[in-house]
Image (cartoon, rainbow, N blue to C red):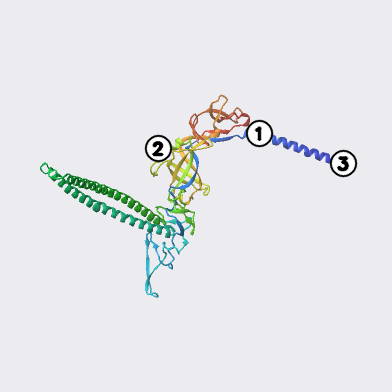
Amino acid sequence: MSARLRTIRNLLIAAVVVGGLVAGYLWLRKQKYEFSITLPEFSTIVRGDLNITITASGVVRPVNRVEVKSKASGEIIRIGLDPDDPNQKGTFLEDTAGALIRLDVYSKARGQTIPVGLDPDDPNHRGTYLYEGDIIRPGQLLIQLDPADERRSVRLRQADAKLAKAALDKARIEAEQGAVARVEAAQISYDLIDWEYERKMRPELRDAITPEEKRRIDSRRGQAAAELDSTKAQREQARQDVARAEAAFDQAQTALEEAQERLDETTIRNTLDGRIQITRINTRVGEVIQSGVTTITGGTVLMVLADIGQLLVTADVDESDIGRVRRLIDPDGDWATSTAPADLPTASGQATISVDAFPNETFTGTIARIRPEPDKTANVTTYAVDILVTSPNRDKLMLGMDATVEFTAQSLHNVLLVELDAVKSNDTGQIGVYVPIAGADGQEEPEFLPVERGINDGVRVQILAGAQEGQRVYTRLPVSLEPEEED
């Protein structure tokens, strides 16, 4: 084939390819145009239920949370007890109520009864037997401090109390016996001298005594009166000494009671009822802690306990929604009962809870209380709402989990519903829907139908009047006919 023919052939092939591309492009443009015109989207007006929800974020926390501190100071020698160790001497083992029971066994080798188990007062036995996450029972031993210092303090306070009691007894004896006896003796002495003075000063005997004897009688009478006044003053002083001794004894007794209380606090037990879990341990064996009574900082937090049998989700509800949440607690509007009731109610407004850890599972709860103090951050005001988790699967929740809470603020049953995208406005501003009707060429075309709307949940809207169940409506009009949607 000549070069000329090959050139002609290549030009023809190129022309065919270019023509095909142009034709394909024009065909695609026509198809796209026809698709937007001839394939609108529809929905159907149906009858059903509509729930209006309020959504808030929250955190899972326990109903009861306690920070364990000690009124005593000292070194931690044990965290928990080891009830399964039979080799420790000087033993106490705990029963199910948390009381201490001493167990003795007879040793044939020694020919005597010896104690076995674990003694919580033995400073030489150390160990950790409780850990974060453990479930503990009421009365169970949590922490044992070395009681040596507090025992010495108790002995010193006992000695002070004995001295104060002895001083009080001495003061009472002095006031009730010594001072009273001296007053009585002085009173008798004065009465005798006064009687003698009155006898000799009678008119028939007055001229018979000499001036010297009269001065002597006056002097003795004055000294007796002064002695009587002095003993009376001593008696009053003795009574005051009794009052001071009583105050000193009371102070010594109070100091002894405080020292005994601190000694008792060296053994720290669980005082909570319920399903109590140790959520945090902030100390270790060998650490020296400070008393929460004698320090400005309030003492060391040794443990944190939480009742995981009762869980709350504390949700932050926006101020624009808090009124409807309060209505859930009390539909009649008795607002006094909707904020901070004395006890957690057994039934109240329902809420649905979800967490990221279980995306395909929901939890239910009841509104326990609305906290009256708001939280204002970045000009956004929210109120904390406590929801008591009541669903059987609540054991799956863990403290501190982030949760999403939905409150059903309003529910409608068996009402006409349509997708929110179907509600539009026409050129005159009327609200309604477009329904398909037969056009002049037999093709469907939209016709505007005014309707009266109700509430919506963001997806569907209630139709109060103007449309019927089963009607088809446009959710997407042909592009060339699409009016501006309502804002």
Look at label 2 and name its amino acid: Asp
Q: Name above or below for residue 367 compared with residue 293.
A: above
Left or right, 176 with reference to 320? left
| Of the image marks 3 and 1, the number of the one nearer the N terminus | 3
Give the number of marks. 3
Disc 3 from disc 1: Cα separation: 43 Å
Residue of label 1: 34
Identify the residue at horizontal 54%, vertical 31% (top origin).
423
What whole-number distance in Å separates the C-alpha atoms at marks 3 and 2?
96 Å
- Nearer the camera: disc 3 or disc 1: 1
Q: Which residue is mark 3?
A: 5
Q: What is the quadrant of residue 137 in the picture? A: bottom left
SS at badge 1: helix
Rendering coords of residue 279 (x, y %): 47, 53
Name the residue carrying label 2: 330
Spot occupied by residue 359 in the image (x, y as percentages of width and height): 52, 47
Q: How many angstroms separate mark 1 from mark 2 (CA)? A: 57 Å
Q: Secondary structure at mark 2?
A: loop
Q: Does residue 354 show up?
A: yes
* Identity, as a three-letter code, of the amino acid under mark 3: Leu
Please tell me the numbered disc located at residue 63: none
Q: Nearer the viewer, residue 295 or 430?
A: 295
From the viewer's perspective, is the residue at label 3 or at label 2 nearer?
2
Mark 1 Cα within 10 Å, few/some/many (few <14, many 20+)?
few
Q: Residue at x 55, y 33 (%)?
A: 422
Mark 1 or mark 2: whose residue is earlier in sequence? 1
User: Is there any visible trace of residue 469 in the rendered image?
Assistant: no
Residue 134, given in percent of the width and then of the height, sits at: 46, 56
